Amino acid sequence: MKIVRLRAFMSRDKDRPRVIVAIDTDEGITGWGECYNHGPDKALPPILEYLSGFIAGHDPRRIEYLILMLVQQSRFPPGALGLAAISAIDQCLWDISAKALGVPVYMLLGGNARDRIKLYAGLYTAPDPAAARDQMDALASEWGITAFKLSPYRLDMHKHRWGEVVRTSAEYFRTLRETVRADYEIAFDAHAKIFEVQQAIQLGNALAPYDPLFFEEPMRPENVEAWGELKRGLNCTLATGESYYNRFEFLRLLSVKGCDIIQPDVCVVGGLLEMRKIAAIAEAHFVTVAPHNPMGPLATAVNVHFSAAQPNFRILEYRLPHGANYAFQGGGEKERAPEKSDGALYVKDPYLPKDGYLELRPDRPGWGVEIDEQVLAKDDYVHWERKIPIRPDGSTGYV
Protein backbone atom coordinates (compact mmCIF):
# COMPACT_ATOMS: atom_id res chain seq x y z
CA MET A 1 0.00 0.00 0.00
CA LYS A 2 1.31 3.47 -0.93
CA ILE A 3 0.29 7.07 -0.26
CA VAL A 4 -0.74 8.74 -3.50
CA ARG A 5 -2.27 12.05 -2.43
CA LEU A 6 -2.93 14.44 0.45
CA ARG A 7 -5.95 16.76 0.32
CA ALA A 8 -6.69 19.64 2.69
CA PHE A 9 -10.12 21.23 3.17
CA MET A 10 -11.14 24.42 4.94
CA SER A 11 -14.60 24.04 6.45
CA ARG A 12 -16.43 24.93 9.66
CA ASP A 13 -18.34 23.56 12.63
CA LYS A 14 -20.93 26.14 13.67
CA ASP A 15 -19.00 29.40 14.14
CA ARG A 16 -15.51 27.84 14.18
CA PRO A 17 -13.24 27.13 11.22
CA ARG A 18 -11.90 23.60 10.72
CA VAL A 19 -9.00 22.32 8.62
CA ILE A 20 -9.65 18.71 7.59
CA VAL A 21 -7.09 16.45 5.90
CA ALA A 22 -7.50 13.35 3.72
CA ILE A 23 -4.73 10.98 2.67
CA ASP A 24 -5.53 8.66 -0.24
CA THR A 25 -3.79 5.37 -1.01
CA ASP A 26 -3.32 3.29 -4.14
CA GLU A 27 -5.60 0.63 -2.65
CA GLY A 28 -8.58 2.97 -2.44
CA ILE A 29 -8.42 3.53 1.34
CA THR A 30 -8.68 7.13 2.57
CA GLY A 31 -7.68 8.25 6.04
CA TRP A 32 -8.97 11.40 7.73
CA GLY A 33 -7.52 13.82 10.28
CA GLU A 34 -8.15 17.24 11.80
CA CYS A 35 -5.67 20.06 12.46
CA TYR A 36 -5.70 22.34 15.45
CA ASN A 37 -6.58 25.53 13.67
CA HIS A 38 -7.63 28.35 15.96
CA GLY A 39 -5.36 30.73 14.08
CA PRO A 40 -3.75 31.28 11.73
CA ASP A 41 -5.95 28.85 9.83
CA LYS A 42 -4.99 29.76 6.28
CA ALA A 43 -1.32 29.02 6.95
CA LEU A 44 -2.03 25.30 7.30
CA PRO A 45 -2.88 24.20 3.71
CA PRO A 46 0.51 25.28 2.26
CA ILE A 47 2.33 23.56 5.14
CA LEU A 48 0.34 20.40 4.51
CA GLU A 49 1.12 20.58 0.80
CA TYR A 50 4.82 20.91 1.61
CA LEU A 51 4.79 17.97 4.02
CA SER A 52 2.86 15.78 1.58
CA GLY A 53 5.93 15.59 -0.63
CA PHE A 54 7.88 13.78 2.07
CA ILE A 55 5.32 11.00 2.59
CA ALA A 56 4.16 10.43 -0.99
CA GLY A 57 4.91 6.89 -2.16
CA HIS A 58 5.44 5.54 1.35
CA ASP A 59 3.48 2.82 3.12
CA PRO A 60 1.00 4.70 5.35
CA ARG A 61 1.13 1.94 7.95
CA ARG A 62 4.70 2.89 8.91
CA ILE A 63 3.35 5.54 11.26
CA GLU A 64 6.34 5.85 13.61
CA TYR A 65 8.75 6.09 10.68
CA LEU A 66 6.75 8.69 8.76
CA ILE A 67 6.02 10.94 11.74
CA LEU A 68 9.67 10.85 12.84
CA MET A 69 10.68 11.75 9.30
CA LEU A 70 8.33 14.76 9.26
CA VAL A 71 9.58 15.97 12.63
CA GLN A 72 13.24 15.34 11.91
CA GLN A 73 13.36 16.86 8.43
CA SER A 74 13.07 20.29 10.04
CA ARG A 75 16.33 21.77 11.37
CA PHE A 76 14.51 23.04 14.47
CA PRO A 77 11.60 21.41 16.32
CA PRO A 78 8.30 22.26 14.63
CA GLY A 79 6.08 24.73 16.44
CA ALA A 80 2.31 25.08 16.67
CA LEU A 81 1.57 25.20 12.94
CA GLY A 82 3.97 22.43 11.97
CA LEU A 83 2.69 20.13 14.69
CA ALA A 84 -0.95 20.92 13.89
CA ALA A 85 -0.30 19.77 10.32
CA ILE A 86 1.64 16.68 11.45
CA SER A 87 -1.15 15.86 13.91
CA ALA A 88 -3.70 15.60 11.12
CA ILE A 89 -1.33 13.52 8.98
CA ASP A 90 -0.73 11.15 11.91
CA GLN A 91 -4.48 10.75 12.39
CA CYS A 92 -4.92 9.93 8.70
CA LEU A 93 -2.27 7.21 8.94
CA TRP A 94 -3.96 5.57 11.93
CA ASP A 95 -7.32 5.69 10.16
CA ILE A 96 -5.86 4.02 7.06
CA SER A 97 -4.04 1.36 9.08
CA ALA A 98 -7.18 0.38 10.97
CA LYS A 99 -9.39 0.42 7.87
CA ALA A 100 -6.90 -1.85 6.07
CA LEU A 101 -7.46 -4.43 8.80
CA GLY A 102 -11.20 -3.75 9.17
CA VAL A 103 -10.93 -2.82 12.87
CA PRO A 104 -11.44 0.30 15.02
CA VAL A 105 -8.28 2.29 15.71
CA TYR A 106 -8.41 1.46 19.42
CA MET A 107 -7.82 -2.20 18.56
CA LEU A 108 -4.39 -1.18 17.22
CA LEU A 109 -3.64 0.43 20.61
CA GLY A 110 -4.05 -2.73 22.66
CA GLY A 111 -7.83 -2.82 22.58
CA ASN A 112 -10.34 -0.90 24.63
CA ALA A 113 -9.63 -0.56 28.35
CA ARG A 114 -13.17 0.76 28.84
CA ASP A 115 -16.51 0.47 27.06
CA ARG A 116 -17.51 4.15 26.97
CA ILE A 117 -15.99 7.61 27.39
CA LYS A 118 -17.10 10.00 30.14
CA LEU A 119 -17.64 13.62 29.05
CA TYR A 120 -17.79 17.13 30.34
CA ALA A 121 -19.30 20.07 28.46
CA GLY A 122 -18.21 23.70 28.48
CA LEU A 123 -20.54 26.59 29.33
CA TYR A 124 -18.53 29.49 28.00
CA THR A 125 -21.02 32.34 28.20
CA ALA A 126 -20.27 32.92 31.92
CA PRO A 127 -23.95 32.53 32.88
CA ASP A 128 -25.35 33.64 36.23
CA PRO A 129 -26.18 30.70 38.57
CA ALA A 130 -29.81 30.41 37.52
CA ALA A 131 -28.93 30.48 33.81
CA ALA A 132 -26.09 28.02 34.41
CA ARG A 133 -28.52 25.68 36.18
CA ASP A 134 -30.91 25.82 33.22
CA GLN A 135 -28.12 25.07 30.74
CA MET A 136 -26.76 22.23 32.85
CA ASP A 137 -30.20 20.74 33.40
CA ALA A 138 -30.89 20.86 29.65
CA LEU A 139 -27.64 19.03 28.86
CA ALA A 140 -28.31 16.51 31.62
CA SER A 141 -31.87 15.91 30.44
CA GLU A 142 -31.06 15.57 26.73
CA TRP A 143 -27.60 13.99 26.82
CA GLY A 144 -27.07 12.77 30.38
CA ILE A 145 -24.06 15.07 30.83
CA THR A 146 -23.42 15.91 34.49
CA ALA A 147 -19.91 17.40 34.32
CA PHE A 148 -19.32 20.96 33.16
CA LYS A 149 -16.61 23.60 32.78
CA LEU A 150 -17.04 27.36 33.19
CA SER A 151 -14.96 30.51 33.46
CA PRO A 152 -14.26 31.52 37.07
CA TYR A 153 -14.15 35.24 36.32
CA ARG A 154 -17.10 37.46 37.25
CA LEU A 155 -15.20 40.74 36.80
CA ASP A 156 -12.70 42.02 34.25
CA MET A 157 -9.40 41.17 35.93
CA HIS A 158 -7.70 44.11 34.22
CA LYS A 159 -10.17 46.72 35.45
CA HIS A 160 -10.85 45.64 39.04
CA ARG A 161 -8.84 45.06 42.19
CA TRP A 162 -7.55 41.49 42.24
CA GLY A 163 -9.08 40.81 45.66
CA GLU A 164 -12.50 41.66 44.25
CA VAL A 165 -11.92 39.36 41.27
CA VAL A 166 -11.11 36.52 43.67
CA ARG A 167 -13.99 37.29 46.06
CA THR A 168 -16.63 37.44 43.33
CA SER A 169 -15.36 34.22 41.77
CA ALA A 170 -15.63 32.39 45.08
CA GLU A 171 -19.07 33.83 45.74
CA TYR A 172 -20.18 32.75 42.27
CA PHE A 173 -19.06 29.16 42.83
CA ARG A 174 -20.69 29.04 46.27
CA THR A 175 -23.99 30.27 44.84
CA LEU A 176 -23.68 27.90 41.90
CA ARG A 177 -23.24 24.94 44.22
CA GLU A 178 -26.36 26.00 46.13
CA THR A 179 -28.33 26.40 42.89
CA VAL A 180 -27.53 23.35 40.78
CA ARG A 181 -27.93 19.63 41.39
CA ALA A 182 -25.55 18.24 44.01
CA ASP A 183 -24.28 15.51 41.68
CA TYR A 184 -23.01 17.94 39.03
CA GLU A 185 -19.23 18.12 38.67
CA ILE A 186 -17.97 21.64 37.96
CA ALA A 187 -14.53 22.60 36.64
CA PHE A 188 -13.14 26.09 36.04
CA ASP A 189 -10.87 27.20 33.19
CA ALA A 190 -8.84 30.33 33.99
CA HIS A 191 -7.52 30.46 30.38
CA ALA A 192 -3.85 31.15 31.20
CA LYS A 193 -4.61 34.81 31.90
CA ILE A 194 -2.77 35.12 35.22
CA PHE A 195 0.90 36.11 35.19
CA GLU A 196 1.78 35.82 38.91
CA VAL A 197 1.94 32.49 40.75
CA GLN A 198 0.56 33.93 43.99
CA GLN A 199 -2.52 35.29 42.24
CA ALA A 200 -3.20 31.90 40.66
CA ILE A 201 -2.92 30.28 44.09
CA GLN A 202 -5.32 32.84 45.57
CA LEU A 203 -7.96 32.21 42.92
CA GLY A 204 -7.67 28.42 43.06
CA ASN A 205 -7.88 28.31 46.83
CA ALA A 206 -10.89 30.62 46.81
CA LEU A 207 -12.69 28.04 44.62
CA ALA A 208 -11.37 25.01 46.52
CA PRO A 209 -13.94 24.94 49.39
CA TYR A 210 -16.71 24.26 46.88
CA ASP A 211 -15.08 21.16 45.37
CA PRO A 212 -14.12 21.93 41.76
CA LEU A 213 -13.63 18.96 39.48
CA PHE A 214 -10.39 20.73 38.53
CA PHE A 215 -8.86 24.20 38.22
CA GLU A 216 -7.54 24.54 34.68
CA GLU A 217 -4.52 26.41 33.33
CA PRO A 218 -4.56 29.63 35.37
CA MET A 219 -1.04 30.63 34.25
CA ARG A 220 1.03 30.84 31.11
CA PRO A 221 2.83 27.59 30.22
CA GLU A 222 6.36 28.87 29.61
CA ASN A 223 7.80 28.77 33.17
CA VAL A 224 7.36 25.08 33.88
CA GLU A 225 8.97 25.23 37.32
CA ALA A 226 6.39 27.80 38.42
CA TRP A 227 3.73 25.12 37.97
CA GLY A 228 5.38 23.05 40.68
CA GLU A 229 5.18 26.04 43.00
CA LEU A 230 1.55 26.59 42.04
CA LYS A 231 0.50 22.99 42.70
CA ARG A 232 2.20 22.96 46.09
CA GLY A 233 0.20 26.02 47.11
CA LEU A 234 -3.21 24.80 45.92
CA ASN A 235 -5.89 22.96 47.86
CA CYS A 236 -7.71 21.73 44.76
CA THR A 237 -7.05 19.56 41.72
CA LEU A 238 -4.88 21.29 39.10
CA ALA A 239 -5.14 20.54 35.38
CA THR A 240 -3.00 21.89 32.54
CA GLY A 241 -1.24 20.96 29.32
CA GLU A 242 -3.23 22.20 26.32
CA SER A 243 -0.40 24.62 25.48
CA TYR A 244 2.40 22.04 25.59
CA TYR A 245 3.65 20.47 22.40
CA ASN A 246 5.35 17.14 23.09
CA ARG A 247 6.38 14.46 25.59
CA PHE A 248 9.55 16.32 26.53
CA GLU A 249 7.61 19.35 27.75
CA PHE A 250 5.17 17.11 29.61
CA LEU A 251 8.05 15.19 31.21
CA ARG A 252 9.46 18.47 32.50
CA LEU A 253 6.03 19.48 33.85
CA LEU A 254 5.55 16.12 35.58
CA SER A 255 9.09 16.12 36.95
CA VAL A 256 8.33 19.28 38.93
CA LYS A 257 4.96 17.80 40.03
CA GLY A 258 3.20 20.63 38.22
CA CYS A 259 -0.34 19.24 37.98
CA ASP A 260 -2.75 16.46 38.90
CA ILE A 261 -4.31 16.07 35.44
CA ILE A 262 -2.67 16.65 32.06
CA GLN A 263 -4.66 17.96 29.08
CA PRO A 264 -2.72 17.28 25.86
CA ASP A 265 -4.47 17.96 22.55
CA VAL A 266 -4.26 15.28 19.87
CA CYS A 267 -4.49 18.01 17.21
CA VAL A 268 -1.57 19.95 18.75
CA VAL A 269 1.09 17.52 19.97
CA GLY A 270 1.70 15.77 16.65
CA GLY A 271 -1.09 13.22 16.70
CA LEU A 272 -2.13 9.98 18.36
CA LEU A 273 1.37 8.49 18.41
CA GLU A 274 2.76 11.36 20.51
CA MET A 275 -0.42 11.52 22.59
CA ARG A 276 0.11 7.91 23.68
CA LYS A 277 3.73 8.57 24.64
CA ILE A 278 2.71 11.61 26.69
CA ALA A 279 0.00 9.64 28.48
CA ALA A 280 2.42 6.80 29.29
CA ILE A 281 4.79 9.26 30.97
CA ALA A 282 1.86 10.66 32.95
CA GLU A 283 0.78 7.17 34.00
CA ALA A 284 4.25 6.55 35.42
CA HIS A 285 3.82 9.72 37.50
CA PHE A 286 0.34 8.65 38.74
CA VAL A 287 -1.26 11.50 36.77
CA THR A 288 -4.48 11.14 34.78
CA VAL A 289 -5.34 12.46 31.29
CA ALA A 290 -8.30 14.67 30.36
CA PRO A 291 -7.72 15.48 26.67
CA HIS A 292 -8.15 19.06 25.51
CA ASN A 293 -10.83 18.82 22.81
CA PRO A 294 -12.44 22.10 21.68
CA MET A 295 -12.27 21.05 18.03
CA GLY A 296 -14.72 19.44 15.63
CA PRO A 297 -16.47 16.04 15.47
CA LEU A 298 -13.57 14.35 13.67
CA ALA A 299 -11.16 15.34 16.46
CA THR A 300 -13.71 14.01 18.94
CA ALA A 301 -13.71 10.67 17.10
CA VAL A 302 -9.91 10.52 17.38
CA ASN A 303 -10.15 11.28 21.10
CA VAL A 304 -12.72 8.51 21.58
CA HIS A 305 -10.20 5.93 20.39
CA PHE A 306 -7.35 7.39 22.44
CA SER A 307 -9.53 7.51 25.56
CA ALA A 308 -10.88 3.99 25.04
CA ALA A 309 -7.40 2.46 25.09
CA GLN A 310 -5.64 4.69 27.64
CA PRO A 311 -5.57 3.24 31.20
CA ASN A 312 -5.11 6.60 32.98
CA PHE A 313 -7.84 8.42 31.06
CA ARG A 314 -10.01 10.65 33.33
CA ILE A 315 -12.63 12.58 31.32
CA LEU A 316 -12.99 14.07 27.82
CA GLU A 317 -13.84 17.65 26.93
CA TYR A 318 -16.79 17.59 24.53
CA ARG A 319 -18.37 20.19 22.29
CA LEU A 320 -21.69 19.33 20.66
CA PRO A 321 -21.16 19.34 16.90
CA HIS A 322 -22.90 21.64 14.48
CA GLY A 323 -26.62 21.87 15.24
CA ALA A 324 -26.90 21.62 19.04
CA ASN A 325 -30.56 20.62 18.71
CA TYR A 326 -31.15 17.08 17.57
CA ALA A 327 -34.30 15.34 16.41
CA PHE A 328 -35.47 11.88 17.46
CA GLN A 329 -35.82 9.75 14.36
CA GLY A 330 -36.39 6.17 13.36
CA GLY A 331 -38.32 3.21 14.85
CA GLY A 332 -38.20 2.72 18.58
CA GLU A 333 -34.59 3.81 18.90
CA LYS A 334 -33.42 7.35 19.65
CA GLU A 335 -31.39 8.21 16.59
CA ARG A 336 -30.16 11.78 16.60
CA ALA A 337 -29.17 13.60 13.43
CA PRO A 338 -27.67 17.09 13.43
CA GLU A 339 -29.82 19.89 12.08
CA LYS A 340 -28.26 21.65 9.11
CA SER A 341 -29.83 25.08 9.27
CA ASP A 342 -26.71 27.21 8.99
CA GLY A 343 -24.29 25.08 7.01
CA ALA A 344 -23.95 21.31 6.75
CA LEU A 345 -21.62 19.25 8.92
CA TYR A 346 -18.67 17.44 7.32
CA VAL A 347 -19.13 14.38 9.57
CA LYS A 348 -22.33 12.54 8.70
CA ASP A 349 -22.55 10.53 11.91
CA PRO A 350 -20.74 12.31 14.78
CA TYR A 351 -20.31 10.68 18.16
CA LEU A 352 -23.20 11.92 20.32
CA PRO A 353 -23.59 11.46 24.08
CA LYS A 354 -25.75 8.86 25.74
CA ASP A 355 -26.13 9.09 29.52
CA GLY A 356 -23.12 11.43 29.66
CA TYR A 357 -20.81 9.09 27.73
CA LEU A 358 -19.71 8.42 24.16
CA GLU A 359 -20.14 4.78 23.26
CA LEU A 360 -17.64 2.85 21.16
CA ARG A 361 -18.47 1.58 17.68
CA PRO A 362 -16.79 -1.84 17.54
CA ASP A 363 -18.27 -2.68 14.14
CA ARG A 364 -16.90 0.48 12.47
CA PRO A 365 -13.29 0.43 11.18
CA GLY A 366 -10.95 3.40 11.54
CA TRP A 367 -12.32 6.33 13.49
CA GLY A 368 -15.85 5.01 13.13
CA VAL A 369 -17.30 8.05 11.34
CA GLU A 370 -18.22 8.84 7.74
CA ILE A 371 -16.95 12.06 6.17
CA ASP A 372 -19.22 14.01 3.82
CA GLU A 373 -16.90 15.08 1.01
CA GLN A 374 -19.68 17.02 -0.70
CA VAL A 375 -19.82 19.32 2.33
CA LEU A 376 -16.04 19.69 2.36
CA ALA A 377 -16.08 20.58 -1.33
CA LYS A 378 -18.22 23.66 -0.60
CA ASP A 379 -16.76 27.06 0.25
CA ASP A 380 -18.04 27.06 3.83
CA TYR A 381 -15.07 28.59 5.64
CA VAL A 382 -15.72 31.08 8.44
CA HIS A 383 -13.04 33.34 9.88
CA TRP A 384 -12.47 33.31 13.65
CA GLU A 385 -9.86 35.03 15.79
CA ARG A 386 -9.12 35.55 19.44
CA LYS A 387 -10.04 38.90 20.95
CA ILE A 388 -7.01 40.41 22.67
CA PRO A 389 -7.91 42.28 25.88
CA ILE A 390 -6.64 45.84 26.22
CA ARG A 391 -5.75 46.95 29.74
CA PRO A 392 -6.68 50.40 31.06
CA ASP A 393 -3.11 51.61 30.41
CA GLY A 394 -3.32 50.59 26.75
CA SER A 395 -1.16 47.46 26.95
CA THR A 396 -2.36 44.04 25.81
CA GLY A 397 -3.33 41.22 28.15
CA TYR A 398 -3.29 37.47 27.72
CA VAL A 399 -6.22 35.96 25.87
Image: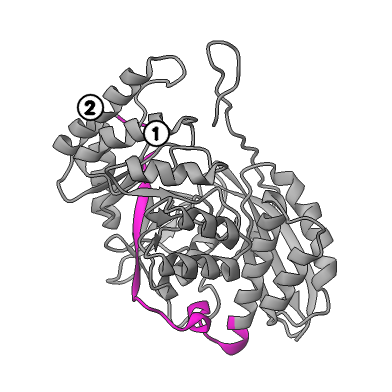
> Crowding near pointer 2: few (<14 within 10 Å), some, many (20+)?
some
Q: Residue at x 29, y 60 (%)?
A: 356
Q: Specify whether residue 109 is painted magenta.
A: yes
Q: Residue at x 64, y 41 (%)?
A: 382
**Residue 293: where, in percent of width, then height?**
48, 54
The colour style of the image is one colour
**Residue 44: where, in percent of width, then height?**
74, 51
Q: Specify whether residue 91 is painted magenta.
A: no
Name the disc covering residue 171, or none: 2
**Residue 62: where, in percent of width, then height?**
70, 81
Residue topped by disc 1: 200
Q: Given the image, on which type of amino acid does mark 1 rest? A: Ala
**Looking at the image, is 75 positioned above or below residue 164?**
below
Q: Is residue 41 left or right of residue 146?
A: right
**Looking at the image, is 193 positioned above or below residue 356?**
above
Q: Given the image, on which type of amino acid does mark 2 rest? A: Glu
Which of the two marks, 1 or 2, is nearer to us in this view?
Answer: 1
Q: Residue at x 61, y 75 (%)?
A: 94
Q: Residue furthest top?
A: 393
